[in-house]
Image (cartoon, rainbow, N blue to C red):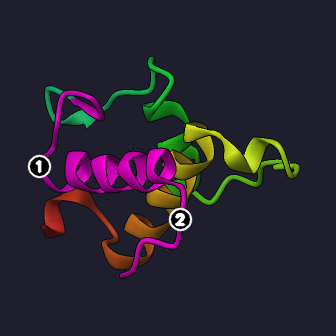
Amino acid sequence: MTNRFRVRKMRDTYKGMVAAYCDRSPLLFHKGARLTLNGFASPFWKGYDNIPMNWDRDSKQTPSYACYIAGRDMANLYKEPDSL
């Protein structure tokens, strides 16, 4: 899996979300269940669940988009978090 972002802020966000997923970080998980109550986790899980979003040119430059793509990529690699 490669990090497709060129802007440092986006690359760092993507990398951080991938690490958070792999480490079962409290940023994404609470007592083993999905956490969706923060600005990073919500788009991550929407990407993970492949929920369509309307990303325009400007919104594709936000950390939320990097979270969404990280979630989508993790879903493509791992079916369930327990498979890590």
Q: Is residue 35 left or right of residue 36?
A: left
Q: Position of residue 65 (x, y in %)?
A: 62, 47
Q: Quadrant of the N terminus?
A: bottom left
Magenta segment includes 24: yes
Residue 26 rendering spot, x and y as whole percentages:
19, 28
Q: Is residue 63 above or below residue 79?
A: above
Tell me the residue that label 1 is attached to. 23
Q: Is residue 55 left or right of residue 18?
A: right
Mark 2 or 1, closer to the camera: 2
Residue 28 occupies which quadrant of the picture? top left
Left or right placement of residue 49 versus residue 14 in this view: right
Q: Residues within 10 Å of mark 1 (few under 14, many from 20)?
A: some
Residue at numbered disc 2: 5
In-image side of 63 versus 61 (left or right): left
Image position, residue 38 (x, y; %) = 45, 19
Circle 2 SS class: loop
Depth order, front residue of 30/40: 40
Within 10 Å of disc 2 (Cα), the crowding (few <14, some 14-19, many 20+) is some
Identify the residue at image location x=15%, y=60%: 82
**Residue 43 figure quarter:** top right
Residue type indicated by callout 2: Phe
Which residue is rendered at x = 43% and y = 56% of the image?
11
Q: Nearer the viewer, residue 47 or 60?
A: 60
Quadrant where the C terminus lies?
bottom left
Label 1 SS: loop
Q: Amino acid at mark 1?
A: Asp
Residue 22 placement: quadrant: bottom left
Between the C-alphas of marks 2 and 1, the distance is 22 Å
* Residue span colored magenta: 1-29
